[in-house]
Image: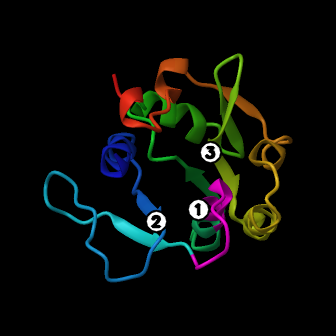
Amino acid sequence: MAVSVAAVLRRAGLTPSIVRRGTEGEPAFLFEDGTAVATLYEPPHGSPHPLWGVAAALAHADDDLVLVVPCDLPDLTADAVRALVDVGGPAVAWDGDRLHPLLGVYPRSRAAEATRTAASGGSVHGFVADVPRVWVDPAAMRNVNRPEDQG
């Protein structure tokens, strides 16, 4: 699924990287054309937390603003991605009812804050509480966390 999401980012005119747990040297993720998706690795840490990936993405960023997208959005569209990126500043996806804090644009200057929040087991929603909301089609934000969610 990570490659599918990365392909959507390419269609939106972006150059995606995948942040993953593990160690360097694991098999690369490949686009359909055979090119490898750039891969970043989370540093080893204690308990799992969604912000570890965000922290790694922000810490490795070359740009001041970083689009963060989870790999479990099979219906994500290039239009949804552009809605966030085209704001030109921090933005978090919102469907009019709920936020999707792992789908947003964040300044790389928040890497240490994401690390602290993850290390303390803090709230992902708290991390994005002050970030401007951008409406994104709810269908594009559908999460697939288990095989039975894919239908």
Residue lying farthest to the left in this orientation? 33
Q: Which residues are magenta?
A: 43-55
Q: Are marks 3 and 1 in contact (CB under 8 Å)?
A: no
Residue 120, label in figure: none
Q: Residue at x 43, y 61 (%)?
A: 18
Please state which amino acid type lies under the numbered disc 1: Gly
Q: Earlier in the sequence, mark 1 or mark 2?
A: 2
- Disc 2 packing (10 Å; few <14; some 14–19; many ≥20): some
Q: Residue at x 36, y 68 (%)?
A: 38
Residue 102, label in figure: 3
Q: Are marks 1 and 2 in contact (CB under 8 Å)?
A: yes
* Magenta-span inclusion, residue 114: no
Pinpoint residue 116: horizontal percent, then vertical percent.
Answer: 81, 68
Q: Is residue 135 above or below residue 37?
A: above
Q: Earlier in the sequence, mark 3 or mark 1?
A: 1
Pinpoint residue 48: horizontal percent, then vertical percent.
Answer: 63, 62
Q: Nearer the viewer, residue 140 or 86?
A: 140
Q: Which residue matches tag 2?
A: 20
* Magenta-span inclusion, residue 48: yes
- Could you tell me how far apart the alpha carbons at marks 3 and 1 are, in whole angstroms? 9 Å
11 relative to 129 in the view: left or right: left
Please state which amino acid type lies under the numbered disc 3: Leu
- Could you tell me how far apart the alpha carbons at marks 3 and 2 are, in whole angstroms? 14 Å
SS for dot 1: helix
Q: Which residue matches tag 1?
A: 53
